[in-house]
Image (tube, rainbow, N blue to C red):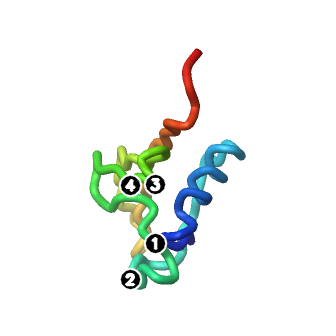
């Protein structure tokens, strides 16, 4: 996952390549190796330099042990409407 310093680049990459699915296999226990790039709470937003943000919209617990699905929306304030 991204570090705190690479978060904006990570969000830009998701936007640029139209990424629809990100799979994180590492728990968010060590913020040095994997910065929390999405919120574990519904309707909360993680921002990168006030330009790109990721809002968690739905959280689904599954029947598979320790597997939780987070659905989020990526918003890019760098793109201007004409």
10 Å crowding of disc 3: few (<14), some (14-19), many (20+)? many
- Taking depth in this image into account, of 68 and 14 the one nearest to the observer is 14
> Mark 3 or mark 2, which has the lower sequence index?
2
What residue does disc 4 label?
Answer: 46
x then y, percent, for residue 73: 46, 42
- Taking depth in this image into account, of 60 and 18 the one nearest to the observer is 18
17, above or below 39, in the image: above
Task: Name the image quarter holding residue 24.
Answer: bottom right
- Taking depth in this image into account, of 28 and 61 the one nearest to the observer is 28
x then y, percent, for residue 45: 34, 50
Distance between mark 4 and mark 2 Cα atoms? 17 Å
What residue does disc 3 label?
Answer: 48
- The label nearer to you, 3 versus 2, is 3
Distance between mark 4 and mark 1 Cα atoms? 11 Å
x then y, percent, for residue 53: 44, 47
What residue does disc 1 label?
Answer: 35
Q: Are marks 4 and 3 in contact (CB under 8 Å)?
A: yes
């Amino acid at each position: 996952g991204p570090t705190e310093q690479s978060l904006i680049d990570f969000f830009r990459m998701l936007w640029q390549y139209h990424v629809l699915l990100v799979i994180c296999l590492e728990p968010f226990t060590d913020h040095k190796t994997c910065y929390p790039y999405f919120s574990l709470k519904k309707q909360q937003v993680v921002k990168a330099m006030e330009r790109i943000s990721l809002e968690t919209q739905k959280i689904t617990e599954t029947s598979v042990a320790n597997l939780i699905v987070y659905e989020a929306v990526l918003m890019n304030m760098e793109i201007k409407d004409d």
